[in-house]
Amino acid sequence: MAIESEKNEGERFTYLDNNATTPMLEQARIALAERLLDGNASSMYALGRKSKAFVEDARKGFAELLGCVPDDVIFTSGATESNDTVLNIAKRLIREKGGRILSSAIEHPSIIETLKRFEADDGVEYSLCPVDGGGRIIVSELEKELVKGDVVLTSIMAANNETGVIQPISQACDLAHRHGSLFHTDATQILGKGDFDFNAGGYDYASCSAHKFYGPKGVGALVVRSGRPYYPLLTGGHQEGGRRSGTYNSTCAYAAGIAARAAKADIRSEAGRLAALRDRLREGLLERVPDISFNGNPDYLVPNTLNVSFRNVEGESILLMLDFEGICVSTGSACATGSLEPSYVLLASGTPIEDAHSSIRFSLGRENTGEDIDYVLEKLPPIIERLRQISTRGRK
Amino acid sequence: MIDLNEWTYSKIVMEHFRNPHNILSENEKFIPDGEGNVGSLACGDQMYVALQISDGKVKDIRWLTYGCASAIASTSIMSDMVKGMSLEQAYEITPEQIVSALDGLPEHKFHCSVLGDKALRAAIDDYLKKNNLPNPYKAKSVKIICECKNITDQRIDELVASQEVRTFAELQEKTGLGTVCGKCKAKAQDLFAELRHIHGFV
């Protein structure tokens, strides 16, 4: 209902941008509202102790979802902070003993842009593993870098936000360990959608954001296996055992813990339901709209994501036309990035540049129904037809 | 109030985007006297302009655009503005005039999406060339970019269009632009990127 409130009376509102953020779960919203008057969880008196208890309850909820022990969960403001913290650890290790960071060409900007900044500011060296035409990292290329023996940290996302392609992180982690590298995964886009188990995978670090699994914005976690190198990014307080300073966000953490438990409990049924809806959308588009192509290897997709290119139509135009119909999606076109280049993820994944400009990402979620898919299949084909009528269609 | 400006288009932009004027329809027999085409699908923006010209004036115009909302809206409003104009007036339409008629555009949209005036000038150039007429407008609109080496925007345009230069470094090597006092370099780099975009190179 948080997102539904955008809707005017009598108008349909169809939210298909759940990889950007998800509408908070009702139980999480209620819990959050109840905790608005929390005390400071570091205070000794009863009010503070009670708030601390809610934080610790949430820590257990996160541990259940991530498959780790509660003590390994450090609450942060979200995956960007978690990613930055891990890269900062690697930077410190490199300063002490040399080496470099290995990541991939399709990581979130909070990894890639931070690596660029580290290189510019501190001369930190890094390499980005390429991906194949289906948007999956090429493991043999990763290995080529790892065998050089100087990689301190390998960071590979669990699933990509734009294409929805699940990455071979378990395999990447084993290779990294075999060659003496620590392994971090940005698990933001997999939680609640696909299998993830921190302990079974043997990862050293993992990042996540609660608002991607129906929790509140501004809270997330960094999981750090006990005994792995650690340096805090934020200092000056004793919170999180000195691992992350700043007053406990007990209000949001508690609500996030509830969302984490729900994501864990519903993963099997939701994944099946979303995959069926997504396939219905895919089949319906293929039937109704000519000249389309799908981005990302369909054998490795998270169940909620469909990335489509509509030849000869620019993505932002489609996005805005859908917005007029109350349908929310995102695009990889340059217009959306505010630059001349379209999505670096799609380009790295071998999508032709024309198709990257023409791409639309549908990402389904808990609140979507078959009716939503039917509504999109009713509204979208005439929009594409109309925009193609006014398009140059690449004439010379 | 919350600042929504970054992604907010004016009412006029939205009207033209939803109901663009003077589109070339597939069934229409519009025989053009001059045609212009700028950009490419790879660039994310492409505009085609077709003109009917009589008595030195733009009698009618049709266009097609591959691009975002502001690209569509800016070509649409330009097509309204230009009808009845003399070729000289039409040639002098600037992106600033188009943006002002649209009641503004978000800043990051300004350069990439307002290509309508360029497609219009290309169509006028095409008309004059086809009819073996002199083109006084092109010479008049020329701007010197590098004063030290006397390099004009049109010279850079020719070099980009013919792909004689593909990078800014090649442009500098070829012309010496920006190698003396260096004052023009930033502006020239922007122009170079824009011209690559207009000519359909990414």
Image: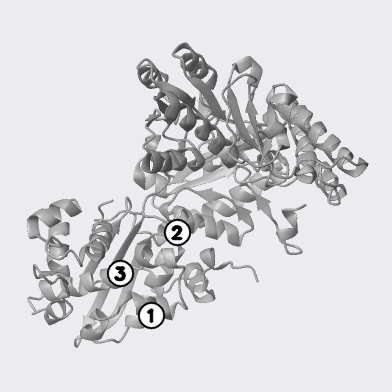
Observer able to see residue A321: yes
- Separation of marks 2 and 1 at Cα, in angstroms: 20 Å
Tell whether label 2 touches label 3 (CB within 8 Å): no
Judge left or right: residue B150 versus residue B110.
left
Residue type highlighted by circle 3: Lys
Q: Is residue A223 above or below residue A22?
A: above
Q: Residues within 10 Å of mark 1 (few under 14, many from 20)?
A: few
Quick check: do tags 3 and 2 share a chain? no
Residue A171: x %, y % from top left:
50, 16
Judge left or right: residue B10 versus residue A221.
left
- Separation of marks 3 and 2 at Cα, in angstroms: 20 Å
Residue type highlighted by circle 1: Asp
Residue at x-position 86% and y-position 42%: A48
Quarter in which the N terminus of chain B is drawn:
bottom right
- In which quadrant of the rendered view does residue A10 lie? bottom right
- In which quadrant of the rendered view does residue A28 lie? top right
Residue B100: x %, y % from top left:
42, 80
Query: Given the current orientation, which residue lies at the most extreme right position?
Result: A46
Q: Which residue is mark 3?
A: B29
